[in-house]
Amino acid sequence: MTSEDRAARASARGVVAVVVTWNRRELLERCLAAVLGQTLRPTRVVIVDNASDDGTATVLNDRYAALPGVQIVRTKTNIGGAGGFALGLNLALGGPGETAWLLDDDTVPSPGALEALVGARTAYLARTGTAPVLVASRAVWTDGREHPMNTPRPKPGAGAVERAHAQGVGCIPIRTASFVSILVDLQRTREVGLPQAGFFLWNDDFEFTARLVRDRRALYCPASTVVHETKVFGGTDADPGPRFHLEVRNKVWTFGRSPGLSVPEKLVYGGATLRRWGRTVARSSDRATLWAGLVGGLREGVGQAPPSTATVLTAALGNAAHPRRGPHPRKTDGFSVLMSCYGGDRADFFETAFRSVTSDQTRPPDQVVLVVDGPLPPGLAARVDAVIAASPVPVSVERLPVNGGLGPALQAGLIRCDFEIVARMDADDVSLPRRFEVQVPLVEGGLDLVGSALLEFADIPERIVARRDVNTDPGRIRAGARFRQTLNHPSVVFRASAVEAVGGYSDLPSLEDYLLFSRMIQAGAKVANVEEPLVLYRVGAGAYARRGGRRLLRSELALQREFRRSGFTSRSQWVRNVVVRGGYRVVPEELRRAAYRTFLARRTGDPRQAP
């Protein structure tokens, strides 16, 4: 056995096979037999039964449930291929593994299919120093012909060096691929997120792989062969019939909302899509159905947003609503700390943050509520468990099956808080020892929401780079909130009843805190800020990039619509906010950095001292 063969076999120990099925029992059995019979067998096999009603559940339970390394999950509703692969990947992220092998249930891989995928990935890593984030198999139909629907095209604009590197390992560089048979990098999946479960069917693989591969490398590996046993042989321009509206809607969502493609790529792929739609309509014998699908798909794509993946998966698992608090009132003789962590957090940052609000405090809390927002990688999961076990403060853990974002996670955690007074803490910041000694008595004395100034640091807490001051006059806090966040979310301590009175945290990415505090201010909450910095706020690489971009612009516009609808801002204030705050989200990162440093956080030579 060569060194490359040994490396490939070692890599295979980190492969999680994910198979999604729906009402294709016989095909599924052939698929699973081939997966379990690979020359390089995956470490784990995750099977998602998408609410099948053809006896699939019985077969899975009788033949596969007891096999070592096999995990079966059955959804309560059919969430389509998009939801199935999102759920399967979500489960893959929750355990050990470097890569996931995604397969449709009508895919039958040849015995060496996985070995070829892993071998190409390993060889490319050895050749270039960087592993491809995706490797796709060659898909053929039952008669051996190349399956046109699942054969990825060479990457447009790939340079000579990129092509040479791919050719050196027997592959072709690609930009997107189908879920029929692909090997994807799990760490990269944690970075970009799961497939869009709201797509249901069609283009979910195109959107996800475009997001996964952007600014990375992906390969088409002809040596890895699978048979895609579709009922008919056809390309992507085959007549989809009534499902054409899904094709249209999801493409509109992809081109309009997904960050997977650059603007030039959207023009290229958009033009190709229009040509293909034209051929599809021209060749169809039922053009009326396709025209109806086109109109309906455009209407849905432009007028609606896809439901979040977290919402779809939570409903599919039978846990659509957050649990409600029991009949017992919250206690008033102590306070809780509310934290959330997710798969992208660093274990050492989390441990430092946790200790800073427990053992390092001059007034420690009476409870820590930790929300684990979706699956964690093994290293982080082990550290979280160890920290909880060693905690000097009781810890209540709320484990969410799907990463749904900070707002929903904090709302789920708030329900678990046993005390009326709740202090917020992020998983990568550091609370200074006197924080709760200073803030908690203010809420005990009658205030509803109290924040503080922050000290920003880079890399290590001792390396302070700036100070974010706050208004301490309640009138200025309330008035200023019409334009900007006047309370620093990582520093706040609040009264739980005041938060719940205005609906709690909402699902508004990156701005859930601003929306909540504005609602509290509008409802008459008593607010205050402490001039003393009580929290060290981590400003790492990418901090300013995260304050802008299309995703945050959408959140910003949604926030401003809600402010105007509720009467929190006047029409002129709404216009000002859309222009200034919306513009801030789309200017180049360097301008955003300069504006932030000028108006929000000032640099300081000895920042631990008061100004």
Image (spheres, rainbow, N blue to C red):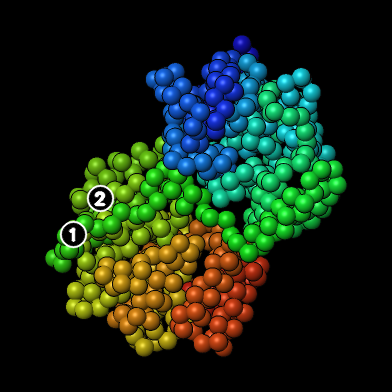
Residue type marked 2? Ser
Residue at the (19%, 78%) spot, across then down: 445
Residue at the (41%, 77%) spot, across then down: 518
The answer to whether any part of residue 513 appears in the image is: yes
Examine the rendered structure and indicate whether residue 191 appears above or below residue 572. Answer: above
Considering the image in quadrants, where does the C terminus appear? bottom left
Crowding around mark 1 (Cα neighbors within 10 Å: few <14, some 14 to 19, many 20+) is few
Q: Nearer the viewer, residue 363 or 143?
A: 143
Which of discs 1 and 2 lies nearer the camera? The answer is 1
Q: Nearer the viewer, residue 518 or 160?
A: 518
Considering the image in quadrants, where does the N terminus appear? top right
The answer to whether any part of residue 348 appears in the image is: no
Image coordinates for residue 302, horizontal then vertical, percent: 66, 62
Q: Nearer the viewer, residue 27 or 610?
A: 27
Residue type marked 1? Pro
Residue ID for mark 1 = 327
Quadrant of residue 204 within the rendered picture: top right
Using the image, tell me which numbered label, if any, was put on residue 396: 2
Q: Secondary structure at mark 2?
A: strand
Q: Is residue 310 left or right of residue 477?
A: right
Image coordinates for residue 241, horizontal then vertical, percent: 72, 44
